Every structure is written in structure tokens, then in C-alpha cells.
Amino acid sequence: MIFRRAYGEILRDLEALEAYLTTLGLHGAPNDRLRGLMVDIRKLERAHAESGLQALESQSQVQTAGLVWSLVEGKGWTEIFRGLNGYDPQVMSTLMRKAMKGPLYPQHETSNSNLARNTVFEMIMGSRFRLAGANLKLGGQRADLLIDHFGSNIYGECKRPQSEQGIEENIAKAVDQLRHRFASDPRPDSSAGFIAIDISKAVSSGSKWLEVEREDDIEPNLSDEAVRLHKLYARDYEREDDPRVLGVLYYILAPVRVGKPKGPPLIAASQIDVFHRDVQEVFPISGGELLKLLTRL
């Protein structure tokens, strides 16, 4: 499923998110990154209204990339707000404090400052599952995500490789973590888990964006990338003979330039592609409900 939002819609949600953060006790500096995103998205909105974004072509590639990635990350924050607004305020306050840290632009992210965006990805995945109807637990110590599926624990391990070459290592690490989750579960025979991989940096690093002729081309193009990366780097998952490792979810949040748009020619598109085993093998009675949940992500 793919989600596309107009600039004005994204801004309205970010303004609502800013107000929500104050109710969580986050004032001043913790919100600076959010305000920076909003400033950049307003620039994009004005550029689109005045010249259809053509004015951006005269700017340096670095400047343009910064604006584009603010649109993309702003879109991610709206997903979090829409899915987790109303969740446990104590948990949300802790997660938001971590997530708001780090540099404004992902190009400036390092191994010492990636905790914030790693937390953002966990929250985006949590938001998608909560909107899909999952009984979700965030912010715990047992896994990045924990879902109560008819009394059984489903663990989610979320990874953000910084390049395409890091995908295989991250999947292998997640498989190993899931094995440990199952071993420590009080009901190991009825537990299961999945791997969530953010492939955004692998597909759209730096100033790179997807270019398509029409909006309808976005979803198949992003799915093609997920299929390609899964075939190349999911060997550890494919070799895993434990059916409780249910699948791999590839999330992508990317800037897309549309040649013949109905709306803005520059779009922040997000999508999840799911590669899963036969979940009925693990959950013979409730597996159908789990499949329905996954298709709603």
C-alpha cells in the first residue's frame, strides 16, 4: 500500500504534531528539528505555487537535496502522528525525545547520531501496525515492536541499513535477535517474529530520487526495488528453517519526481512490501487474521 500526501496536508499534520509535543512536555530545543522541516516544506510549497518547482533547478544540488529530504522526513513524521496520537503519553514522550535528536538532514547522519532516525523508523512501523489494528506495545525492552496476536507474542526487529551493502548484515542480525526472542519467550512454541528493513537510504541516497512518468508508476517501481533487494540480500532469511521467522517487511520513504502529475510534481511516497512464509504453519487458527493485518500495512 502506498501513501502520498500534498505539501499543505503534510504541513497541517506537522503543526498538529508540534502542538501534541507540547502536551507531552517537549518544549523549545527538542522541537527545533521539526520546525526546520516545516520551514523547508513551506519553501517547497511556495516554489510549487510560483513556478511549479522549476525555481529549484537554479539552486545548488545540496540546497535542493536538503529541501527534498525535509519533505520526505516530514511525511514520515505525519505517519507517526496519525498512527500513534493517543498512545501511552509516557512512552511517547520518551520515544519522541530520542527521535527529535540528530541532525536536520539525513546526509549529515553518522553512526554516532543515527539513534534518532532509528527510533523514528520504529515509530513509523509501530504506527502502521496500530493503524492496521494490531495490539501493539512500543518502547519495551523485549523487542523493537511487540504485538499481542491472540495471546501469542509477535516480535518485530527494525533495521535501517545506511547503504544497500548493509542490508544483508542487518537481516542476519535481525534473524539472530529473533532466535533469542523465541528462546526467552514463556511460550516459545507459539511465538513468532518478523524483520522490518528501512531501504530508503539504499534506494534514494543523497540527492537521488525516483523519476516516473505518472503517479500510477510509483508503486510498481518501488515494489521492483524491494524485490531486487530481497533477492540479493535476504539469503539468511531464506535459509532460516524456523517457520516462526515469518517474513521480511521492506519499508521505503522516498522522493519521487513525476513527469505528468495530477498534483505536485515532487511527491514523498511511502510503501511497505511484505515477503512472508505460510503463517498458517505457525498460527493454524489465527493465521488468516495475521495475513489480513499485514495486507493493511
Image (cartoon, grey):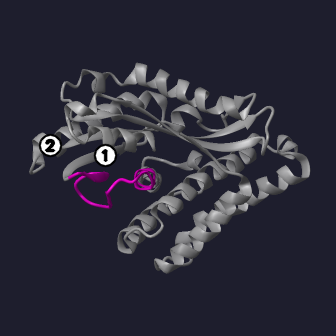
Inspect the magenta stretch and tell me whether residue 129 lies in it. yes
- The residue to which callout 2 is attached is 190
Q: Residue at x 48, y 47 (%)?
A: 110
Q: Amino acid at mark 1?
A: Gly
**Which tag, 2 or 1, sits closer to the chain's start?**
1
* Measured Cα–Cα span from mark 2 to mark 1: 15 Å
Against 251, residue 5 (above or below) is: below
What residue is shown at x 50% (from left), y 63% (from top)? 100
Question: Could one spot residue 130 in this view of the protein?
Answer: yes
Any magenta on residue 44? no
Classify residue 101 as left or right of residue 17. Answer: left
Q: Helix, strand, or loop for circle 1?
A: strand
What's the magenta region?
Answer: 126-150
* Vertical comparison of 98 with 204: above or below: below
Where in the figure is residue 250, as x and y percent of width and height? Answer: 44, 35
**For this rendering, which residue is in front, 200 or 115?**
200
Residue 169 pos. (x, y %): 34, 31
From this view, report whether residue 242 is shown above or below residue 140: above
The residue singled out by tag 1 in the image is 156
Q: Is residue 72 left or right of residue 260?
A: left
Q: Disc 2 on helix, strand or loop?
A: helix
Please report the residue visible at 67 percent of the width from the left and 29 percent of the height from the top.
217
Tell me how many marks there are.
Answer: 2
